[in-house]
Amino acid sequence: MDIPRTDIDQRRRRRLVLLSAAGALVLAAGIAVAMLDPLAPEVDARTLFIDTVELGNLERRVRGAGVLVPREQRWIAADVEGRVERVVVRPGTQVQADTVLVELSNPAVQQLADEARWALDVGRAEQASLRVRLQSDVLDQRATIAEARAESEAARLQAEAEGRLAGQKIISELQLARSRLTAEQLAVRLEIEQERLIKLEESVDAQLRAQLARVEQLRRAWEHRKGQVDALQVRAGLDGVLQALSVDAGQQLALGASIARVARPGSLMAELRIAEIDAKDLAVGLPASIDTRNGVVAGEVARVEPAVQNGTVKVEVTLTGPLPAGVRADLSVEGVIDIERLTNVLHVARPVNVQPESEATLFRLAGSSDATRTPVRFGKASVDRIVIASGLEAGDRVIVSDVGRYERSDRLALD
């Protein structure tokens, strides 16, 4: 007779219970681990720039790099084609307005000038000859009028005398009628000759004016050609310093080719390039300071270009303070423009890649070894500080250096 073994069933039930309990513990542990925050990256605090939010006044400024340029300068171009025969002056030389910088040569220009001069001489000679001939015609007509007047007067006197004789029956009425008819004809002829003189004088004036206009045209053509010859001697045209020279001896220049640049010394201004996002509040008259690397010069915004080029706006600043020694045109400078003074605002050092009037997240320190990502809304910005519109309070410490490598982390562990 077989006897059932109850101890084996008990062991099996006990093992099943233990396995079930172990599985439940493992599942609970997994759920607990899943509910925990991911491990925060550890960051060396010495590699970070941490700033404290402050409540107070903020001077809004914008900064831009640029160069010093002359306020009065002249770009010199070739007025005629020619070959550079000689370079007379080199850059950096003090020049006067009539100083010859470069000598050019062009035989064709000289030939055309000579031909224009000859044409002008011929025109003037023709004008003189025409004037003499016309004056002679006028004199001839006046002589004709004098003769006609004498004949008319003689005929009138004869007709009057014969009229008295005819009254005494000394001459016939037919003779008297003929004398009176002759007197009338000669009087009419005198009037015609006088009218002819008037027309002749008008014709003389018209011909002389036409010839004068012709001579004036030839004179202007000669002056133009002479000016081209004079342009072969390239002059500064301005008292100042030769800043640049872009030609060499033997070089062939086309019409309008750039030759040199002359600037008046001691009259400089700064041309700054301001990022377009910082330039919206710029206006004429704002105070500025220009760092020449050899001293800071006070200035004032004189002009703001309306167009944006390559993401920047050009701003011209008039220098109002004394210039440091060694300052010259084309010197690289850095300028700061004061826009406005904000009072009683929250502000912090401007974080990397944060723009004014935008939203971003910063790591705010909670204690000395833990930083939590916090959303922040920003307001107006200055050169190195920015207004906090919301998200932070005075006294909060935040990381403002570049933490882009931790963009997927919401916490940082500082050590």
Image (cartoon, grey):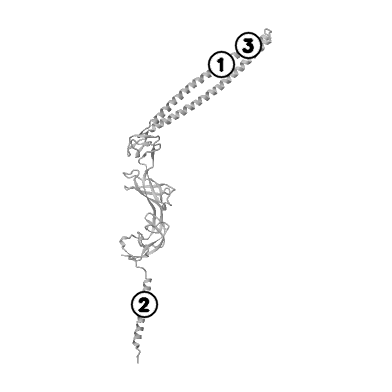
- Quadrant (top left, top right, bottom left, bottom right) of the N terminus: bottom left
Specify the label residue 144 is tagged with.
Answer: 1
Numbered disc total: 3
Camera-side mark, 1 or 3: 1
- At x 46%, y 22%, the residue is 125
What residue sits right under mark 2 in the picture?
Answer: 23
Is residue 325 left or right of 304 when viewed as pictured? left
Q: Secondary structure at mark 1?
A: helix
In the image, residue 73 lies at what x, y percent?
38, 40
Q: Earlier in the sequence, mark 1 or mark 3?
A: 1
Which amino acid is tagged 2? Gly
List the residue tagged with mark 3: 158
**Residue 13 position (above or below residue 159):** below
Task: Identify which amino acid the numbered label 1 is placed on.
Answer: Thr
Residue extending farthest to the top is 170
Look at the picture and state if 231 lies above or below 272.
above
Helix, strand or loop status at disc 3: helix
